[in-house]
Amino acid sequence: ICTFLQAVSHVLIFVFCFVFSAEVAHQFQYAVRVIGSNYAPTIERDEFLVSEKIKKERGIFLMLFSCLQGVLKHRWSVLYLLLSLSEDPRKPSSRVGNYGALFAQALPRDAHSTPFYCTRPQSLALSYGERSTGLSASVGTSGISSLGVYTLNGPTPTPQPLLPAAGGGQPLGSRLAWTLPVSSSPSSAMVPPAARPPLGPPVPAARVVRPRRDGDPAGEVNEAALVRDILYVFQGIDGKFIKMSAQDNCYKIDSKVVLCKSLRDTSSRLAELGWLHNKVRKYTDARSLDRAFGLVGQSFCASLHQELKEYYRLLSVLHSQLQVEDDQGVTVCTESSLTLRRLLVWMYDPKVRLKTLAALVDFCQGRKGGELASAVHAYGKTGDPQMRALVQHILSLVSHPILNFLYRWIYDGELEDTYHEFFVASDPNVKTDRLWHDKYSLRKSMIPSFITMDQARKVLLIGKSINFLHQVCHDRTPPGKITAASKSADTPKDAAELLSDLEGAFQEKIDAAYFDTSKYLLDVLNRNYLLLEHLQAMRRYLLLGQGDFIRHLMDLLKPELARPATTLYQHNLTGILETAVRATNAQYDNAEILKRLDVRLLEVSPGDTGWDVFSLDYHVDGPISTVFTRECMGHYLRVFNFLWRAKRMEYTLTDIWKGQMCNAKLLKTMPELSGVLHQCHILASEMVHFIHQMQYYITFEVLECSWDELWSKVRQAQDLDHIIAAHDVFLDTIISRCLLDNNSRSLLNQLRAIFDQIIEFQSAQDSLYRSALEELSLRLQYEEKRRQREEEGQWGVTAEQEAEEKKRIQEFQETIPKMRSQLRILTHFYQSIVQQFLVLLMTSSDESLRFLSFRLDFNEHYRAREPRLRASIGATRGRRLSNI
Amino acid sequence: MASAANANLNAVRETMDVLLEISRLLNTGLDMESLSICVRLCEQGINPEALSAVIKELRKASESLKVQTQPPLKLISSHCIYM
């Protein structure tokens, strides 16, 4: 078999070499010799090892290896062959003149070069003792790769088996060695495998052998030792020479150590990194124990951890680099060793990053939630692009939980915020009826600075609307129907995208959600709960908008209300109300509205008539009570009271006028009354004018204008808050213009006084008419009797009758001056009150009231009487605020 | 019979492809022909260490010959004598 094989191989090798020229024969012989000399390979026929070796070189091998079927008989030998032929890409192409130098070339270890190559990080050796044992251990772990290194160098030195026994290797090595024509460094093959196996190809004598030890402590510390120390300091561990000094809060080099100045300075500069690292580490460690830190804080710590991990990776690379140099025992070449200067340069970028992180940590001490996000965001406003990128990254991680909260709140109305980090706060004590106003509020401190106040308010409103719909309106449509929920921030990457486009995409999202939700809410309110209808109903009934109904009601109620208040019964009045409703246009109103209309009797004080205690009422419940709150209803009732009284005055004066018109003709026959009557008429018309103007003012200037504003605002309203605000403004305007607020109390009192006067006048006039009419009727009777008697043929009147009659007329006429003086007093009193009223009006701050004073005094009738009114408008404008 | 032979042929071809891929990954510099020769040599039982040494030697020699202004030489195998 041997010869057969040899024959075959001869032929094949010849095939290999046949294109060569004459020198080929020499090679051929050599080749045959080599091949012939060893067919018992030294290393174990272990496919696994070989494949492991190859795997170390290239990762995809495993896939391919599994594809190899059992076609090859000597699979491992093929693989071994391929492995040995494989070239290290970083191996410098060696153009060798002679063969021997081939094996003398030093090859850098493939796995460990400067940190800028991607390296395989090794485990951190954290103490000296560990490091020395780690040395041998590293050989064990990376034994395979080191084997790979050996094979790269060719057959010498022969690859050591994993078991330390190297006996078999020796003879082979020597055998190979003599086949080489020239061997420049036989020592390479002769290096005995000792406790420290040869770690690399032999080194020309010119290289410097780096001492393994750190240098004697008595002498100057050399740079290598410092580098080792610094690498520990980078992680925050005290080194041999550089230790943390607590009182200065920095890393200081032991002053006992002899060190040249430049090295000392460089070490101090590098030690700063250790200090920064400690700071960041302390923060993350402290915070991770804090249970109440919240999601935002935790993500902040997570991002800091990430950064620290990168930092540790860098440190491990540096460590491994150091280890390489240690392992080799010699400096490979001065360009790739680790010096302080090199560290300075390489650690510059990490230092900047750590500085940013430490500054962030300082700034964010004690903050959490949205505040923390604001703090981080504030740090992103810098010109340095790297720092900005770093802070943006952290910000995206930190704001991710906040955005999650936000999206859940906007799209589902749910708030799960155990650590109070979100800027929407919910008060759990508030019941459903106050849900809209009180339950949800903004936590201003937690609003991140990249979310504007407007956006925050909109966000609050959206969630509030959803909750309102669910709880108060009992509307269970899923929020997905209300607004198309766009993809929420599921990953921090989404958050980062969103943050980069805050004005655009984020605002759009919020706006879209806002519009949709509010529109839906308003739709529900208007459709299901008839909000706008109720608003109009308030106007019609409580604000006396429905004229015919009010008039009819008053007609029906007049006899009732003239009675003392204690005799009134609610059900009677309600019955009258119903009658009024049925008889007028109010019957065509929505039943929903009519059933809420009711009579309310106010509290009775002694001496009240029905007029003082009567009031209409309108019941509200459910969602509309959010708009018509209890305070609003109170306001409405006050305004109703005022308007009702004014209406009553109008009514009274109408009666007076009616009476006057009717009786004027009748009483024409009594010329002595004409003076009195004339006075009455004058006074009555004054009053009529006054009340007329007041009514005009109230109805048109106050009610109608404010109502118009309210209605247009409500129609245009985009959300419920707008409606509530507009409604409140409406009520406030009405109340202040109707003299019902605190500022106009004096005016109101005057007005009340005027009203009282009118009523008094009415009673006075009534009594006057009564007596006059009585007198008239008596006279008529007398005349009638006389005529009758004349017809009967008697004397018309007897002398006594005539005397009686005359006496009676005399008496009557004596009462006239009394009446006249009474009337005069009344007139006087009335006019003085009106004048005071006018003065107050002129000096009021409200412009429409001032104009009212013009209208009331259009012909300056009062002005002539009242010197204070003679002051011109210009003067009063200056003295507007000071009450005369 | 033919199918079995075909299957065998396919397997062989597949294996060669895989080996070519591996050798390409390992950057051995072997082309298909040389690789097939090497595989056949190994299958015959030759010591792979020695063979790889020889190949490297030959390569270096060819390089040096190239340096001595020789036209570039390629390893071609025109015919293989196989048992």
Image (cartoon, rainbow, N blue to C red):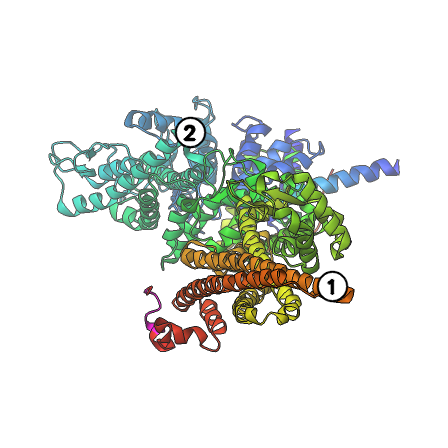
Image quadrant of residue A533? bottom right
The quadrant where residue A361 appears: top left
Identify the residue at horizontal 64%, vertical 44% (top origin).
Answer: A599
Q: Is residue B29 visible?
A: no
Can you say which quadrant of the picture contains the N terminus of chain A? top right
Residue under the point 31% across and 50% down: A348
Q: Which residues are magenta?
A: A876-882
Separation of residues labelled 2 and 1 (CA atoms)? 117 Å
Residue A851 visible (yes or no): yes
Residue A291 tag number: 2
Disc on the earlier residue, 2 or 1: 2
- For badge 1, the amino acid type reads Arg
Determine the chain carrying the residue at label 2.
A
Circles 2 and 1: CB atoms closer than 8 Å: no
Q: In the image, what residue occupies the spot 21% across and 39% down?
A: A250
Q: Chain of mark 1?
A: A
Residue A789 numbered mark, or none = 1
Identify the image quadrant of the C terminus of chain A. Answer: bottom left
For this rendering, which residue is in front, A213 or A658?
A: A658
Return the x and y of residue A344 as percentages of the image width and height: 27, 48
